[in-house]
Image (cartoon, rainbow, N blue to C red):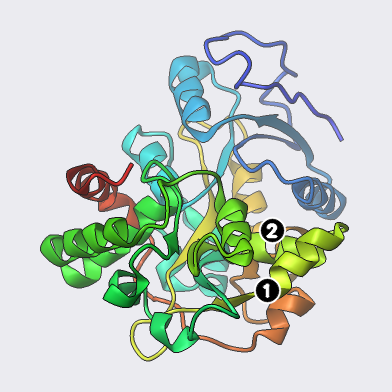
Amino acid sequence: MTSWRKSLVLAPFLTVLSLPSVGLAEELNIYTARHYDSDEALYSAFTEETGIEVNTLEGDSDQLIQRIKREGAASPADILMTVDAGRLWRAEEEGVFQPVESSVLQQRLPDQLRHPEGLWFGFSQRIRAIFYNRENIDPELVQRYEDLTRAELEGEVCIRSSSNIYNQSLLASLIHHHGEEKAKEWAQGVVDNMARSPAGGDTDQIRAVAAGECSVGVANHYYYVRLLKSDKIADRKAARRVGIIFPNQEGRGAHANIGGAGVVAGAPNADEARKFLEFLASDKAQNIFASGNNEFPVVDSAFADPVLESWGNFKTDDVNVSVLGRNNPRAVRLFDEVGWR
């Protein structure tokens, strides 16, 4: 497979790269902010099925968006792939995407995972779960995101910084369901219950819960699965000390975000790009998402990873994920107002 990967983190202002020629038949150029080795399997499977060669450029989502803007009409980008509806919304706001009409995507993907105007689509789901120390806390205390503000949890909550897009989207969903005033109260309540200043990534929150630094943490589900499957004994032991909760099962369901993609405006290979999006909705690609990065497939006929399957069925929030993007600026402002660092 052709590859022209470059690190935009190391050269964020670089405007000229040595790229393959574009506009050739049966070629596809993907700018991706997904840094998972398993995605190579997606590209290989697509090429094997269609004969279309895939070229990839990896980088930070915001840097890729700005790069596409700088390149303008000369951009070789056909597809932008990234994670979280908040980042897809940022690309949408910058005019990166063009609308796609596809009966395959309409039939295969749930309504709430498709942008209302077809600008981008969600192909995998990640659940923002609550984790608890099995020895230190009764899980009945934290069955809802709203429970993170309970007085009994003062000094017991570990969660990432407000700059984290996953937390921004969670708060964006609370703004949708409860309004700004109640969402702000929730954010303030979580700040009041923090065991420590926000630090580290999602895996760090789970490890902190396992170590007893806090009784409760918030993280995306697949980080937990990575610990369960780790080659390191210490990781697996830590995971066994922690339980997972999919919140709000008696109400709206657990907050679900996405890994998604859209066709770039002016894409030189727009037809191939549409075919790639349709491929991502196939059972083959959905199974790769599930087995490669432990993400939940979005198509019912696809198989999830055995660990995910063992958790059984649970309810997810069916709000259209585009709402998470539209509410992002308000979520960021509320975090600032309550001093969530």
Q: Secondary structure at mark 2?
A: helix
Label 1 packing within 10 angstroms: few (<14), some (14-19), many (20+): some
Query: Dots 1 and 2: beta carbons under 8 Å?
Result: no
Name the residue located 63 percent from the left edge and 16 percent from the top edge: 10
- Confirm whether residue 143 shows in the render: yes
| 282 lies above or below 260 | below
| 154 lies above or below 10 | below
In the image, farthest residue toward the bottom: 250
Image check: 59 left or right of 52? left
Q: Secondary structure at mark 1?
A: loop
Which amino acid lies under the numbered mark 1 shown in the image of this protein? Arg
Which amino acid lies under the numbered mark 2 shown in the image of this protein? Phe
Task: Return the x and y of residue 240 as percentages of the image width and height.
Answer: 72, 74
Image check: 312 left or right of 196? right
Name the residue located 34 percent from the left edge and 82 percent from the top edge: 252
Q: Which mark is residue 241?
A: 1
Q: CA distance from mark 1 to mark 2?
A: 39 Å
State which quarter of the image contains the C terminus. top left
Question: Which image quadrant is residue 145 in?
Answer: bottom left
Task: Return the x and y of residue 137 as percentages of the image width and height.
Answer: 49, 80
Disc count in the image? 2
Question: Which image quadrant is residue 170 in?
Answer: bottom left
Image check: 40 left or right of 262? right
Residue named by callout 2:
279
Relative depth, front residue between 76 and 239: 239
Q: Which mark is residue 191?
A: none
Task: Return the x and y of residue 278 as percentages of the image width and height.
Answer: 63, 59
